Image: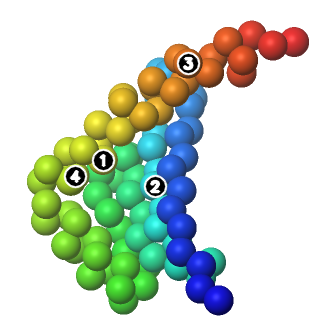
Amino acid sequence: VFQKLSTSECYFINGTEKVRFVERYIYNRQTEVMFDSDVGLHVGFTPFGERAAKDWNSDPARLEYKRTAVDWYCRNNYEASRPFITERR
């Protein structure tokens, strides 16, 4: 049995003042590649992940797409979910 998945996470500090987007690519419970918007690049953690990160980091269009995910993915979803997350008692 093999397991392959990816996760996208948004970290919010003080509302949307400071937002961090993290995307992980995982194979058999081990993170192979991670993109962190604070770093702005893909980082590889395995030999395969290092090759993939090098390839992905050489594509300016892919990097720009990932770097702007803070706005189109995180902030957009925060505004849609805010009434249910922050205004409930």
Q: Do the CB atoms of the residues marked 1 and 4 lie less than 8 Å apart?
A: yes
10 Å neighbourhood of mark 1: few (<14), some, or many (≥20)?
many
For label 1, the residue is 66
For label 3, the residue is 80
What amino acid does circle 4 point to? Leu
What amino acid does circle 1 point to? Lys
Name which residue lies at 28% across and 76% down.
52
Residue 40 in the image, given as x and y percentages of width and height: 29, 51
- In the picture, residue 49 is in which quadrant? bottom left
The quarter in which the C terminus is drawn is top right
Q: Earlier in the sequence, mark 4 or mark 2?
A: 2
Between the residue at mark 1 and the residue at mark 4, the CA separation in whole angstroms equals 5 Å
- In the picture, residue 87 is in which quadrant? top right
- In the rendered image, is residue 30 in sight? no
Colour style of the rendered protein structure? rainbow
For label 2, the residue is 23
For label 4, the residue is 63
Residue 56 in the image, given as x and y percentages of width and height: 22, 66
Q: Earlier in the sequence, mark 3 or mark 1?
A: 1
Left or right placement of residue 17 versus residue 68 in this view: right
Q: Outermost residue, front direction?
A: 1
Q: Do the CB atoms of the residues marked 1 and 2 lie less than 8 Å apart?
A: yes
10 Å neighbourhood of mark 2: few (<14), some, or many (≥20)?
some
Query: In the image, is residue 5 above or below residue 83?
Result: below
